[in-house]
Image: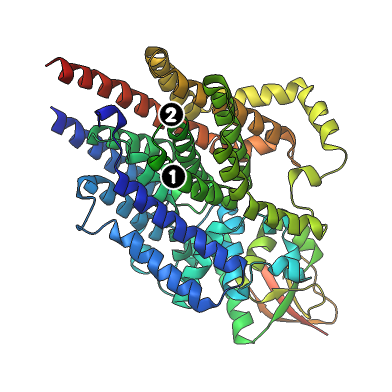
């Protein structure tokens, strides 16, 4: 194996096992399984998580172990103050902790629950369910430790992403960029950092599937993709959009390069989207308003056209993009790297650009359809909604440098 | 040279973590030590009106109150406060037909209601 194709398979397997346990926790909540089963699964999950930090394996990654441990310590030593993380994460999780029923809103006409808008209750519940299981295992609630389960959730994509770097310089460069651009979003109880990591990891898997010719390694990648797609779509509404964006981008690349349709990828995406589709269907079936499209007055299409033709809205969006320094820096870095290595890594760069264009367009449409005014929506969320794109550009900048740098070393070694 | 780069990058990661902890997240060692204690982090997480919310919750627990309502004035005047009261006092339920009322102390005294506790910002009434 040359340096260009380096992959640490044991890290990928670890990532799959951890990811599967996270998904299984949600599944146990979804089928209203006995609490004992949830607890057993959580203990297994916790032990798997802790295994990463033992000196038994992965000793080459001790810096990553230190950084993840420090993130956990910061998470446990920080108050939960952002309004969105309190309402969307902590409060939803607290309700699950007390009610022990994922379908509490659907089964109850409780006014206490109705006080908050149904946009809150219909949000995907994977991360919340994990936090609720942890609290039920401990038997009490507080304002701090429940959000620490975010660290367990971010570990599978981080481990997966570093598994393609043999050189520690690239591992640390990527970890630094990740912390620099979005460090607090992994630990403050918001889902944005979590879905950003799964988004980037899923793009990498889809690229490896498109690029690889080895069927055995592809099987592992499909399994990983299924788990990551499921977690992505069940963590936040944007996650479902991301899954579709990645699938469509991969579909286009397949058509361009192989002139065929990857049915396995289609099937994996389809199966992974079933749980979130069922969740949303239950709310639609009970006629509970839950999304941008259903809230507010009038036809969403008219709203979109009205807002898109209003120069004030467009100026607001352009202004918020122009002051989003994280997005600008990451785009700048990626542009330079992509320009330099375009000939060698055309397929990957095109895949990234398709993902960018589709997800960026989806975000702009989302901003224009918000029940609030466009300027208020931008004020609240213009930085964090772009974090997935920022991390995508950062990771693939490092990945492209690694790929091309390794190729040079391989050529040099073969000459010698 | 390579080792120096690795060391530098690791150092940068640690500096960034320090920045996140100190400037972005309001990290404190006492919170860390108590992070698994019951009621940990309530004051620091609930913001400016933390003492008021904690007093209301404690009154509910002392008097074994299971349901409460919030005055229309408070719901409109301070939706954020109402949110936090509902969220923080859960599993004590917010029901508009309950006989325990939380109102702002800017509001005039409620008819047929008796004050059972008051905080800096809120009055808690028991209504007939």
Which image quarter holds the N terminus of chain A?
top left
Q: Quickly name the residue at label 2.
A: A211
Quarter of image, res B59 = bottom right
The residue under the point 67% across, 26% down is A316
Asked if residue A235 can be seen in this view, the reply is yes
The disc at residue A63 is none
Residue A138, x across and y down, in percent: 44, 75
Q: Quickly name the residue at label 1.
A: A219
Decide: few, some or many residues near mark 1? Use Cα within 10 Å; few <14, some 14-19, many ≥20: few
The residue under the point 19% across, 57% down is A55
A33 shown above or below A58: below
**Chain under callout 2:** A
A374 shown above or below B47: above
Q: Is residue A78 left or right of residue A173?
A: right
Q: Secondary structure at mark 2?
A: helix
Same chain? Circles 1 and 2: yes
């Amino acid at each position: 194996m040359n340096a260009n194709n380096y992959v640490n398979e044991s890290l990928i397997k670890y990532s799959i096992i951890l990811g599967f346990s996270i998904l299984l926790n949600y599944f146990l909540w979804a089928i209203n399984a006995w609490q004992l089963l949830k607890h057993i699964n959580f203990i297994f999950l916790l032990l798997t998580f802790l295994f990463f930090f033992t000196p038994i394996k992965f000793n080459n990654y001790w810096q990553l172990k230190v950084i993840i441990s420090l993130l956990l310590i910061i998470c446990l030593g920080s108050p939960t103050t952002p309004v969105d993380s309190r309402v969307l994460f902590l409060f939803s999780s607290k309700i699950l902790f007390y009610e022990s029923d994922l379908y509490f809103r659907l089964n109850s006409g409780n006014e206490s629950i109705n006080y908050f808008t149904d946009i809150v209750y219909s949000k995907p519940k994977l991360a919340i369910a994990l936090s609720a299981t942890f609290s039920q295992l401990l038997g009490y609630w507080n304002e701090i430790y429940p959000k620490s389960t975010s660290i367990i959730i971010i570990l599978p994509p981080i481990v997966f992403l570093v598994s393609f770097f043999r050189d520690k310089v690239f591992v640390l460069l990527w970890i630094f960029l990740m912390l620099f651009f979005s460090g607090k979003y992994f630990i403050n109880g918001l889902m944005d950092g979590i879905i950003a990591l799964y988004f980037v990891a899923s793009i990498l898997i889809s690229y490896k599937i498109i690029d690889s010719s080895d069927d055995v390694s592809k099987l592992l990648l499909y399994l990983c993709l299924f788990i990551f797609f499921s977690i992505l779509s069940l963590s936040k509404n944007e996650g479902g959009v991301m899954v579709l964006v990645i699938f469509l981008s991969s579909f286009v690349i397949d058509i361009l390069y192989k002139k065929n349709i990857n049915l396995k990828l289609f099937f994996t995406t389809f199966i992974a989207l079933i749980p979130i589709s069922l969740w949303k269907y239950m709310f639609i079936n009970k006629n509970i308003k839950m999304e941008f499209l259903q809230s507010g007055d009038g036809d969403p299409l008219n709203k979109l056209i009205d807002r898109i033709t209003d120069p004030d809205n467009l100026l607001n969006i352009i202004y918020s993009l122009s002051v989003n320094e994280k997005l600008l820096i990451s785009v700048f870095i990626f542009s330079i790297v992509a320009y330099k290595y375009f000939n060698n890594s055309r397929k990957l760069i095109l895949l990234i650009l398709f993902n960018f264009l589709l997800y960026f367009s989806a975000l702009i449409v989302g901003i224009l359809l918000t029940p609030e005014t466009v300027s208020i929506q931008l004020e609240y969320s213009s930085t964090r909604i772009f974090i997935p794109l920022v991390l995508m550009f950062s990771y693939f900048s490092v990945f492209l440098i690694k790929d091309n740098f390794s190729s040079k070393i391989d050529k040099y070694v073969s000459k010698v | 040279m390579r080792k120096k780069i690795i060391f530098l990058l690791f150092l940068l990661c640690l500096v960034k973590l320090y920045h996140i902890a100190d400037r972005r997240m309001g990290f404190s060692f006492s919170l860390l030590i108590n992070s698994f204690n019951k009621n940990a982090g309530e004051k620091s997480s609930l913001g400016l009106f933390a003492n008021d919310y904690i007093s209301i919750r404690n009154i509910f627990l002392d008097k074994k109150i299971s349901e409460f309502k919030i005055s229309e004035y408070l719901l409109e005047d301070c939706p954020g406060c109402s949110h936090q009261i509902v969220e923080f006092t859960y599993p004590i339920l917010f029901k508009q037909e309950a006989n325990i009322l939380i109102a702002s102390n800017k509001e005039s005294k409620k008819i047929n209601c008796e004050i059972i506790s008051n905080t800096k910002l809120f009055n808690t009434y028991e209504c007939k």
